[in-house]
Image (spheres, rainbow, N blue to C red):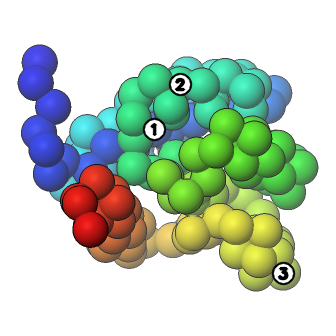
Amino acid sequence: MTRGRNVIRVLVAKVGLDGHDRGAKVVAQALRDAGMEVIYTGLRSTPEHVVQTALQEDVHILGLSILSGAHMALTRKVLAQLKEQGADKEMAVVVGGTMPPVDVRKLKEMGAAAVFPMGTAMSTVTKEMQELGKRMLAARENAASPA
């Protein structure tokens, strides 16, 4: 399969010991239906595995689905891994799942490009992911263009 040059690529990942992935699969299907290419890691991935998969798949957006309550620690580890790999500017990290409203702001301050707490409308998720993906595509194109 040939990757489209302007196709937004998204990795949907379940990190930590969270064993519930119905929501992640529903989001993955909605993003695919909206025209994005989606890779799903499956359950219980480590932050290191998620980052390595995101780099190998050359995604524009790394989406974390976390229902366990460990969203702050796991997001921090994924962001640190991306920075350590020098890829923190190449892909956006978004977080979805169960979290108190006060943590939405903290996740964004930490570096999450978007946060989708439980109850966010799917139309909002797909619209924001398309807008974010287009910005990431444009940023990569600008970085690749000769000055």
Q: In the rendered structure, which amino acid carries the disc numbered 2? A: Thr
Picture layout, residue 97 above or below residue 28: below
Left or right? Give the position of 6 relative to 27. left
Picture layout, residue 50 above or below residue 116: above
Quarter that holds the N terminus: top left
Q: In the rendered structure, which amino acid carries the disc numbered 1? A: Leu
| Residues packed near mark 2 inside 10 Å, few (<14), some (14 to 19) or many (20 plus) | some
Mark found first going from the N terminus, 3 or 1: 1
> Tags 1 and 2 in contact by the CB under 8 Å rule?
yes
Residue pointed to by mark 1 = 11
Q: Secondary structure at mark 3?
A: helix
Residue 40 percent location from the top left of the image: 45, 29
Q: Residue furthest top?
A: 1
Q: Which mark is residue 53?
A: 2
Q: Which mark is residue 79?
A: none
Q: Nearer the viewer, mark 3 or mark 2?
A: 2
Mark found first going from the N terminus, 3 or 2: 2
Residue pointed to by mark 3 = 102
Residue 2 percent location from the top left of the image: 10, 24
Q: Residue at x 77, y 77 (%)?
A: 109
Question: Which is nearer the eye, 138 or 21?
Answer: 138
Q: What's the CA distance linking mark 3 and mark 2?
A: 30 Å
Residue 129 percent location from the top left of the image: 37, 64
Q: What's the CA distance linking mark 1 and mark 2?
A: 8 Å
Q: Nearer the viewer, mark 1 or mark 2?
A: 2
Q: In the rendered structure, which amino acid carries the disc numbered 3? A: Val
On the question of residue 78 being in view, the answer is no
